[in-house]
Image: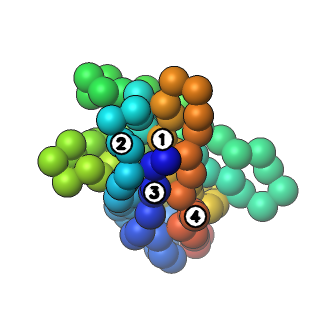
Amino acid sequence: QVQLVESGGGLVQAGASLGLSCAASGNIDIVIYMRWYRQAPGQQRELVATIDTHGTTNYPNSVKGRFTITRDDVKNTVSLQMNSLKPDDTAVYYCNARSRDRNFWGQGTQVTVSS
């Protein structure tokens, strides 16, 4: 099992920056990918950032150039730095850990961007 706890959400104005953090604990050696997802009301959960064990990152076009995912393997944390935020970025953001055959999720943290 892997336990994930997110922090850092909040209310910001459009154009501002915000950082999210995810603390991982448990059997973290099984984790291959760490990801951030988001889900806006009435919409499907959307992948916004991925980082693997080598530090390779991937982003969808909707956030590329604005969001940055990093990992600290000493502190067992994964962070998401979000810049130039837009109202469309408003959602609950979830930390995800993917092993070979399982997904683990955090409880989510709300990010609200006002126009």
Tell me how far mark 1 sits from mark 2, CA to CA.
9 Å
Residue 93 located left or right of residue 50? right
Q: Look at label 2 and name its amino acid.
A: Ile
Q: Which residue is mark 4?
A: 107
Q: Residue furthest bottom?
A: 11
Q: Which residue is mark 1?
A: 97
Q: Earlier in the sequence, mark 1 or mark 3?
A: 3
Q: Nearer the viewer, residue 7 or 46?
A: 7
Q: Earlier in the sequence, mark 3 or mark 2?
A: 3
Can residue 81 be seen here? The reply is no
At x 29%, y 52%, the residue is 77
Q: Residue furthest left?
A: 74
Determine contact: label 3, label 2, CB under 8 Å.
Answer: no
Say what secondary structure mark 4 lies in: loop
Tell me how far mark 4 sits from mark 3, CA to CA.
8 Å
Say what secondary structure mark 2 lies in: helix
Find residue 4 and report its horizontal and vertical position in percent: 45, 57
